Image (cartoon, rainbow, N blue to C red):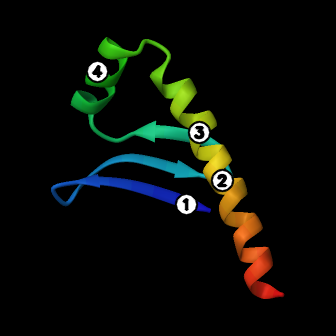
Amino acid sequence: YVSVEMVDEVQVEYYDSNTQRLIPKQDWVDQANRDKVPDYLERATENIKGIQQAFKAGMGILKQ
């Protein structure tokens, strides 16, 4: 599972289920988020892990 977040055709975040880490791709995005929510990266990573699990479950249902 891979998730890519884009803003104005620029990649700003990337998540890969192999590493299970959300990686900011733009320094300004990382800094803006950390200024507002110091543990943003940890929270966002946990959130996307949940989305990944929901997607996996949905795909399992569709396969049936």
Does 39 sit above or below residue 6?
above
The crowd level at tag 2 (other Cα within 10 Å; few <14, some 14-19, many 20+) is few
The crowd level at tag 4 (other Cα within 10 Å; few <14, some 14-19, many 20+) is few
Outermost residue toward the left in this view: 8
Residue 9: x percent and y percent? 19, 60
Q: Nearer the viewer, mark 4 or mark 3?
A: 3
Disc 2/disc 4 C-alpha distance (Å): 24 Å
Amino acid type indicated by mark 1 = Val
Per the image, the residue denoted by label 1 is 2
Amino acid type indicated by mark 2 = Ser
Does 37 sit above or below residue 45?
above
Q: Nearer the viewer, mark 3 or mark 1?
A: 3
Q: Earlier in the sequence, mark 3 or mark 1?
A: 1
Left or right: 20 in relation to 2: right
Does 61 sit above or below residue 13?
below
Residue 22: x percent and y percent? 52, 40
Amino acid type indicated by mark 4 = Gln
Disc 4/disc 3 C-alpha distance (Å): 19 Å
Residue 51: x percent and y percent? 61, 52
Per the image, the residue denoted by label 2 is 17
Q: Quadrant of residue 37?
A: top left
Evaluate whether residue 22 shows in this view: yes
The crowd level at tag 1 (other Cα within 10 Å; few <14, some 14-19, many 20+) is few
Per the image, the residue denoted by label 3 is 47
Per the image, the residue denoted by label 4 is 31
Disc 1/disc 2 C-alpha distance (Å): 6 Å
Q: Earlier in the sequence, mark 3 or mark 2?
A: 2
Residue 17: x percent and y percent? 66, 53
